[in-house]
Every structure is written in structure tokens, then in C-alpha cells.
Amino acid sequence: SAVISQKPSRDICQRGTSLTIQCQVDSQVTMMFWYRQQPGQSLTLIATANQGSEATYESGFVIDKFPISRPNLTFSTLTVSNMSPEDSSIYLCSVEEGEGSGTHNEQFFGPGTRLTVL
Amino acid sequence: GESVGLHLPTLSVQEGDNSIINCAYSNSASDYFIWYKQESGKGPQFIIDIRSNMDKRQGQRVTVLLNKTVKHLSLQIAATQPGDSAVYFCAGLYSSASKIIFGSGTRLSIRP
């Protein structure tokens, strides 16, 4: 299974600033995903990032607020721009890889980046 | 709209007993349903999945049941252990888009 690391693991930021979160995978993957998990909540998909194409954003998420880069098959970044306290969440990347349970490609998740905006 | 939700936000179980975590969904377009386990400070970890045309699937100490008539999904954990303490999410997978929609989560705590 893919091993995923994220940097930073956590950060405390001031309102109005931006933070770029990095996601590194130990193998080449086509599809990478960024999720947000607000405190005590479930995961919400922000966007799908495929190498060589622009990210596809879910309803309620826009590129100006969450620009994403996908320069190669092992790396992606998510920027949270012009942050407000409402952006305080855990941000997770995930990748789709290979034959999971034999029924579909399995998704593996990184450990997440815990962001607090003051 | 699409939603996958859970009946119970918390569940406390005696160690050694069986745990049953329930989930209801509203959109029948999922190709698969998946259960994830999320321990504190970690990302979700795949436990087991079930294709939408199946009723039951068993894994090691876990069983997933799918009732499409009432749009209900459950995860059964046999002989619950302290290491099972976590938040459990059900999710629906739309395989054509590789999109996973998560439910709201149930926290499972184990009493010694």
C-alpha cells in the first residue's frame, strides 16, 4: 500500500495569511485527492488532482481559495488562501492505487495536517 | 442530494462483546460501500468494502451487511478489543469518478 506523508503535520496561522500543505507519496499514482475534516466532523472532498491537468473542485470549493499543484506523480500541494478561523480543520490528501480488495482501486490517506487559524 | 449518514454518534462496548455500527444512505448510485477506521491523529484506514449488488461480506473479525431495501449499512466487529477504539466512517464510492462520499462517523469506545 502507498505510504503518504504530509507537511506540516500541524500549524497555527494568523487570519489573512496563506498556508501551503505538501503531500508526498512513495509511489507514482495518477489520482490524488484533497479532503477537509472540520473538528468533530466527517471528511469532505475538496478536489481531485491528476498530474498533467487542472484540479477538479467539488461544489463549495474554488481554486482561488484552495489552489492545488500536481507537478508530478508523487507530489501535490494544497494552499489554503486568505485564511479565516472557519478554515481551521484537518486537511488530508489521499491517493488511489492498484487493486485494493480485488473489487476496486483502494484509496489510502495521509496522516493529515491540523490547521488552526487565529 | 448525496448523503451517507450514521444513526449513532457514539457507541460504548464492553471488551470482548460484539460491536454493531449502523449507517443510512440516501443516494443509491454508489457502486461500493466502504467502512473506514480513523484513529486519533491519523488518516482513515480502509477496513472492508461491499459491492452494491451484495448483501454481506466478511473479513477478519468484521462483517459488513447491506440492506438496499431500506438503504442501510452496518459494520459488525466480533470480540471487540481495545485496539478497535476509533471513529468509524461509512462511505459510498462512485467508481466512475473515483469519488468517495463520507458519512458522519461513529466513535467506538471500549470498556475494560
Image (tube, grey):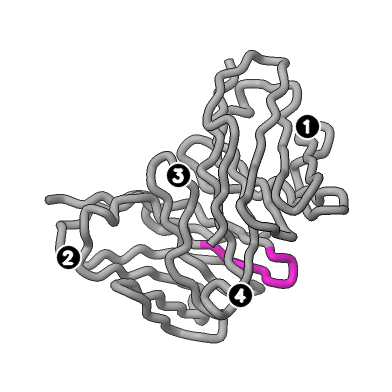
The location of residue B89, given as percent across then percent down, is: 46, 57
Amino acid type at circle 1 is: Lys
Q: B74 left or right of B50?
A: left
Q: How far apart are marks 4 and 2 (CA)?
A: 31 Å
Q: Distance between the residues labelled 2 and 3?
A: 25 Å
Q: Mark 1 points at which residue?
A: A65
Residue segment shown in magenta: B91-98
Q: Name the residue under label 4.
A: A104
Q: B27 left or right of A78?
A: left
The location of residue A69, given as percent across then percent down, is: 79, 41
Q: Name the residue under label 3.
A: B42
Mark 2 vs 3, N-terminal side: 2
Q: Does the magenta stretch include residue B58?
A: no
Q: In this view, does A3 lie above or below A84?
A: below
Q: Name the residue under label 2.
A: B17
Q: Which residue is drawn at 45% across and 70% down?
A: B48
